Structures are given as C-alpha cells and as structure tokens.
Image (cartoon, coloured by chain):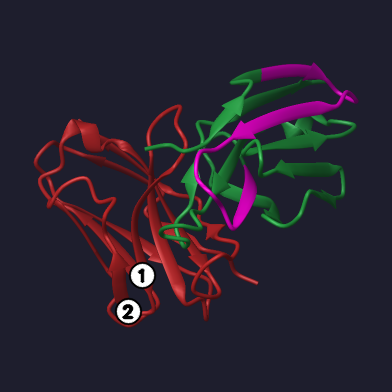
Amino acid sequence: SQQGEEDPQALSIQEGENATMNCSYKTSINNLQWYRQNSGRGLVHLILIRSNEREKHSGRLRVTLDTSKKSSSLLITASRAADTASYFCATDDSGGSNYKLTFGKGTLLTVNP
Amino acid sequence: GAGVSQSPRYKVAKRGQDVALRCDPISGHVSLFWYQQALGQGPEFLTYFQNEAQLDKSGLPSDRFFAERPEGSVSTLKIQRTQQEDSAVYLCASSKGWSQETQYFGPGTRLLVL
C-alpha cells in the first residue's frame, strides 16, 4: 500500500520558473526522502530530511518538512528542461519497519524549453 | 564509483515461464531491497536483506516470488510460473547500513509477461 500522496499529479511549467510539489504521509517517520525518476530509468536520490529538521537545501532544491501536518514540499528553483521527470517522496515508519521505504504515486513534472 | 546494477534491463516472458532477475549492489553495502513498480505508480516494497539474511519478505505478492542473497552481495529475485499481473519494473536498492539511510537504486528490470 502507498503511504504518500504527491500533489499535484502532474505539473507543466516553462524553463526558468519554479516548481513546487507536495507530499503527505500517514505514519510517524524518522526521515523523508525525495527521488527523481526519468522515463524508463531508475530512481535518483535527491535529498533526505530528518524528522527533527524543518528545511533543507541542496543546490536548486529546497525541501520543507512539517511533521505536525505530516507533509513535505519540494521546491525546484530556476527549472531546466532536464528537470523533466517524475518526483517521488518516500518515508520510513518510525513505529514499525524503519528500513523499508513507502512511496507515493509521484508528480510528473514537465519543463518546457 | 559503480552504482547498483541490474540485469537484464528488459525481459519478455511467456505466461508460465520462470524468470530470474539479478542485482549487484554497491560494494560493501549491508542492506539490499527489492521493490516492484507498476506503470504509473510508485515503487512498492517486496523484500529486505541484511547481508545474507532475508529479514523481511512481507511484500512478496505470492509464493511464486523468491529472493536470495547467498553470499551477502549479489541478489536474485526469481518469479516462478509468471503471470500477466507480474508485468512491472523490478527495482533493486542498497544502503550502507541497517536502517534510516539513503537507499541507492539500480536502473530496474522491466518485465513484460505475455
């Protein structure tokens, strides 16, 4: 079963614009991770944010985490055509099996040149 | 350094055929995971190894699915008597430690059962 829900399901923007994707989850977590998946390829790890962190940056990526709302957001600034991909959030379960990841259905981001 | 590799990248099987999917994790990684990703969905957990021990196989859909990691490195996911609903991308991931760490994914094996 899928724990996370990404929102929106699909997002289309112009190159140079910012893209924001949201993720909601159900259980208590130790950390939340964001992954990118290009068409027909594996998942690439983007960023991990721990449950005691509220915000984290990596290059053009900014992730926020609100454990009280069980939600996270991923912001990609100054988007490029190469950012076109599906983006997934993944969580562990601090009250259960904390080694396995539970993924949402993903947000399909299209960046138009 | 080398990432996680999987083979074959694509596999077409006739219904009823057995298939074996291979995963080579990052060298020295203790943990190894298999996930199944249906079209348009996120990956779903199948099974977890810590070294050679299979600690969790709760996600395996049926007893036709079997995974092993006999020497604590390479792993094989075997599906017996494949059925059309087994068509999916099978992803392998490895991580350095035991839990709460980044999992690094391979490119996946796309299985199509006809």
The percent position of residue B107, horizontal first and vertical second, equals 50, 51
* Residue at image mark 2: B52
Mark 1: amino acid: Phe
What residue lies at 41% left-to-right and 49% top-to-bottom? B9
- Residue A2 found in image quarter: top left
Numbered range of the magenta stretch: A11-35
In the picture, one chain is green; tell me its letter: A
Q: Which mark is residue B49?
A: 1
Q: Is residue B55 left or right of residue A10?
A: left
- Residue A113 found in image quarter: top right
The percent position of residue B114, horizontal first and vertical second, equals 19, 30
What residue lies at 54% left-to-right and 43% top-to-bottom? A41
Q: Which chain is home to disc 1?
A: B
Q: Does residue B40 sit above or below B97 in this rendering?
A: above
Image quadrant containing the N terminus of chain A? top left
Mark 2: amino acid: Glu
Q: Nearer the viewer, residue B80 or B56?
A: B56
Say whether marks 2 and 1 touch (CB < 8 Å).
yes
Q: Nearer the viewer, residue B23 or A87?
A: A87
The percent position of residue B10, horizontal first and vertical second, equals 37, 44
Q: Does residue A11 sit above or below B30 in this rendering?
A: above
Q: Which mark is residue A94?
A: none
Say if the magenta span includes residue A29. yes
- Colour assignment, chain B: red
Name the element at disc 2.
Answer: loop
CA separation, marks 2 and 1? 6 Å
Q: Is residue A55 left or right of residue A100?
A: right
The percent position of residue B18, horizontal first and vertical second, equals 14, 51
Q: Which chain is home to disc 2?
A: B
What residue lies at 56% left-to-right and 52% top-to-bottom? A29
